[in-house]
Amino acid sequence: MSHPSLVLGIETSCDETAASVVRDGTEILASVVSSQTHSQHGGVVPEVASRAHLEQLLPVIDETLREAKCRPQNLDAIAATTGPGLVGALLVGASAGKALSLAWDLPFVAVNHLHGHIYAAFLEEPDVAMPLVALLVSGGHTMLVEMRDHGDYKLLGQTRDDAAGEAFDKVARLLGLGYPGGPEIDRLATEGNPEAVRFPRPMLADGYDFSFSGLKTAVANHLKKHPNTSTQDVAASFQAAAVDVLVTKAVRAAQNTSTGSLVLAGGVAANSELRRRFAEAADDIGIAHFLPSRSMCTDNAAMIAAAGWQQLRIQGASPLNTAVDPSWGFAA
Ligand code: KG4
Ligand code: ZN
């Protein structure tokens, strides 16, 4: 059999319904992301998300194939996220992927969403040097991962409570901003003073694990005591504290492992201050770094197709009875 080339990726783990066609794990022919609006609820409501995926997924796949100028018979495989994520949301994408793989007689690949986030880097820079250290920061996860080769990951550390994105979203809520809060805080922080309030830097000196719930509580306490602090100053000061911790630990991991490059991944990797500080810190220690473009940091299906293409080469197809796993961790 010739090497698989064109992979249809499907992503429905949270509130983005996405499909993409990617050639050889790197060339995006089409990537369609339909974002649901959960802002009126201040967060994602699982049942609402599953229903919206059901309504949107087939139109999104149709649009993707049309944009890619690709017919089902041109595809070589289908890759769908099967975890981690919301169980009902995952089921919609995984079931559609399996059904289409049966109908179109194509191999099915069950992809880990977290692997997908790291593959966002390979989509734009296929030659990222390995071993690499990835700082994966999203709404559900905050992790430092050493990737020694394709399919060979080691979890170095992770959050003990809230994820970084969750902290941005919760602080945004305290400030009366909409959901998701990360982009709003990012924007407001540019108008604020990051030194206006000295928020704590939790676990800064210890290892590779993170903790963000204390930082969020510190913001809540500050707002109770000083309700008149400007929203911009609180946003900038909170962001400075969160970014300080994330960058310090990523640098520590890079220096203590024989890493060739530092990679930023996940929705929070779209944050301007994190991108700036991460790049600056990598330059300071003389390690190559890679920041995927913003649209590839937040959930999309191109990253799932790219991860699925590599997985197919290394491990082959997944059985059609592969179950979704809402709490699938990093290791295979
Ligand atoms: O990776 P992602 O799209 O979904 C998950 O897998 O969780 O990440 C979503 C998270 C949300 O918490 C959102 O607030 C955060 O990424 N985010 C940001 C920015 N853009 C998205 N956080 C800080 N600054 C941003 N510019
Ligand atoms: Zn994600």
Image (tube, helix red, strand yellow):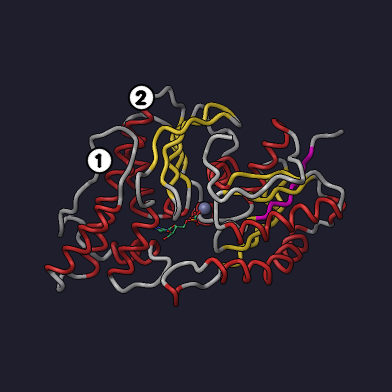
Mark 1 crowdedness (10 Å alpha carbons): few <14, some 14-19, many ≥20: some
In the picture provided, is 151 more to the left or to the right than 61? Answer: left
In the rendered image of this protein, does residue 295 appear above or below residue 207?
A: below
Which amino acid does the dot numbered 2 rest on? Asn
Which residue corresponds to the image point at 68% horizontal and 58% vertical from the top-left?
93
Q: Nearer the viewer, residue 296 or 280?
A: 296
Whole-percent x, y for residue 86 in the image: 55, 58
Q: How crowded is mark 2: few (under 14 residues within 10 Å), some or many (20 or more)?
A: few
SS type, badge 1: loop
- The answer to whether 245 is drawn above or below residue 87 in the figure is above
User: Is residue 133 part of the magenta span, yes or no?
Assistant: no
Residue 202, position as x, y percentages in the image: 24, 45
Q: Residue 256 carries which label?
A: 2
Name the residue carrying label 1. Answer: 203
CA gap, disc 1 and disc 2: 18 Å
Q: Does the magenta stretch include residue 7?
A: yes
Span colored in magenta:
4-10
For the view shown, which residue lies furthest in the left direction? 225
Q: Position of residue 78 (x, y in %)?
A: 75, 49
